[in-house]
Amino acid sequence: MYKEEITEKLKQIAQKPIAEAKAELVSFELRPQNRNMFIRVLVDKPEGISIDDCALICRAIECEIDEEGLFSQGYTLEVASPGLDRLLTTQLDFQRVLGKAVILSYDTGGNHIEKIEGVIEDAADDSITVNVKGKKESIKYLNIKKAKQKLKYDKRKK
């Protein structure tokens, strides 16, 4: 099998356990690592995904891979959360951070990139609305170059 075919087969295998955990596939990576294959599956839920959820998904995927005999040389499977500082790329990502601060860069036209910090007020089908210091800006997803949730750190020692 070619890498593309294996990738599609693995995504199909992963769909059922991910759906059963009421999670969604955020990203998928398949690459060689030494003499084995490395598979990374990042999953999430609107309320966040637990380590137990990741372990259940991992075991189910692992059983199917072994049953199908996809890798004769061996593999490493990692199922994890994408983390709080992940890039926001889809409408669902922006819906998850409604009411929260983000930092984003976007193309304003004419190859000019602007970086702003504001609060996500809406995540529609084709654009987001960001409140930047009281001013609402509508930005199309296609123009967003990079977006991340702004995280607050408590620097007080406990």
Image (cartoon, rainbow, N blue to C red):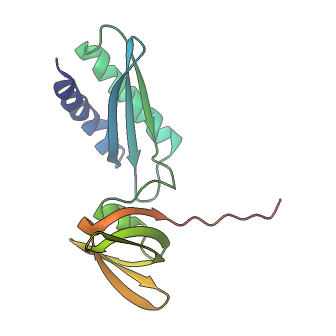
Residue 27 location, quadrant: top left
The residue depicted at 27 percent of the width and 68 percent of the height is 143
In this rendering, the count of numbered labels is: 0
Residue at image location 45% in from the left, 47% down from the top: 82
Residue at left 35%, top 28%? 60
The x and y percentages for residue 145 are: 34, 62
Camera-nearest residue between 144 and 93: 144
Which quadrant, please, contains the N terminus?
Answer: top left
**View extreme (bottom): residue:** 134
In the image, farthest residue toward the top: 72
Which residue is nearer to you in this view: 18 or 151? 151
Q: Is residue 24 above or below residue 153?
A: above
Front-lying residue, 51 or 7: 7
Q: Quarter of the image containing the C terminus?
A: bottom right
Q: Residue furthest right?
A: 158
- Which quarter of the figure has residue 46? bottom left
**Above or below: residue 148 compared with residue 25:** below
Q: Position of residue 36 (x, y in %)?
A: 38, 14
User: Percent from the top left, x then y, of residue 48?
Assistant: 47, 54
Classify 110 as above or below 76. Answer: below
Residue 101 versus residue 26 in the image, above or below: below
**Residue depicted at x 33% and y 59%:** 89
